[in-house]
Image: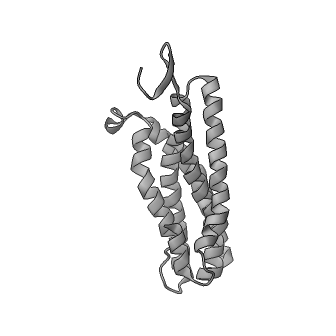
Amino acid sequence: MSKNNKNELGSIILHSKMIQASYGTTSIVTHLIDMVLVSVVIFFYEAEIGLNIWLVGLAYIIYMVWDAINDPLVGHMTDRPFKFTRKRGRRFPWMMISYIPWLISFFLIFTPPDIDNQFVIFGWLLATLCLYDFLESIFTVNFFALFPDKFRESSERVSASAFVVYLGFLGVVGAFLIPGLFIDFGDIGSYVVMAL
């Protein structure tokens, strides 16, 4: 029995509360970033950058359509076996490959080109939102698909789910508190600092 295992029942490995909590900590980051995306980006582009609100809305509509198409495609792509997923499992390599690029794509959303052309700024917003969603999908699809593979017993799933939910709630709360510590209205650079 390895030190990560609390108990073994046949081939089913039960994980310690610490392992369950470590799995749940990922939901802090995912919820924090997603809620900042929802609560800050529209204001940033409309009020700070000066992009017409209709173009911001159109970018979000196209982004939502992209999201509806992208998630199943990413799920299908990452569910297939690849040479690089044999050693570390089907899910973990995808999470590791996408994590840093996903965070960089979030940062890029807050660094639009410094020009007055509305359509270039619209294109930047749309491209960075879609890139963000693609990379976020690679990470989160595999994160959530890992759950039933990792936690096989129903009692263990309930316990691990509690960590995911409660720690995710901390991410949501943080999304409404943390940006206010960094954002100075009228200072576009403060949004870039917040995104870091």
Q: Nearer the viewer, residue 162 or 137?
A: 162
Q: Nearer the viewer, residue 64 or 11?
A: 11
The percent position of residue 31, horizontal first and vertical second, equals 61, 53
The percent position of residue 28, horizontal first and vertical second, equals 58, 51
Q: Residue furthest top?
A: 10
Question: In the image, is residue 196 above or below residue 150?
Answer: below
Q: Residue at x 65, y 78 (%)?
A: 46
Q: Quadrant of the N terminus?
A: top left
Question: In the image, is residue 23 above or below residue 52?
Answer: above
Q: Residue at x 58, y 47 (%)?
A: 27
Does any portion of residue 29 appear in the rendered image? yes
Question: In the image, is residue 108 above or below residue 5?
Answer: below
The percent position of residue 160, horizontal first and vertical second, equals 60, 34
Label tally: 0
Question: In the image, is residue 193 above or below residue 4?
Answer: below
Q: Residue at x 66, y 65 (%)?
A: 177
The percent position of residue 39, horizontal first and vertical second, equals 67, 65
Q: Residue furthest bottom?
A: 116
Q: Which color scheme is applied?
A: one colour
Q: Residue at x 61, y 65 (%)?
A: 178
Does any portion of residue 110 appear in the rendered image? no
Question: Toward which corner of the image does residue 183 lie, by quadrant?
Answer: bottom right
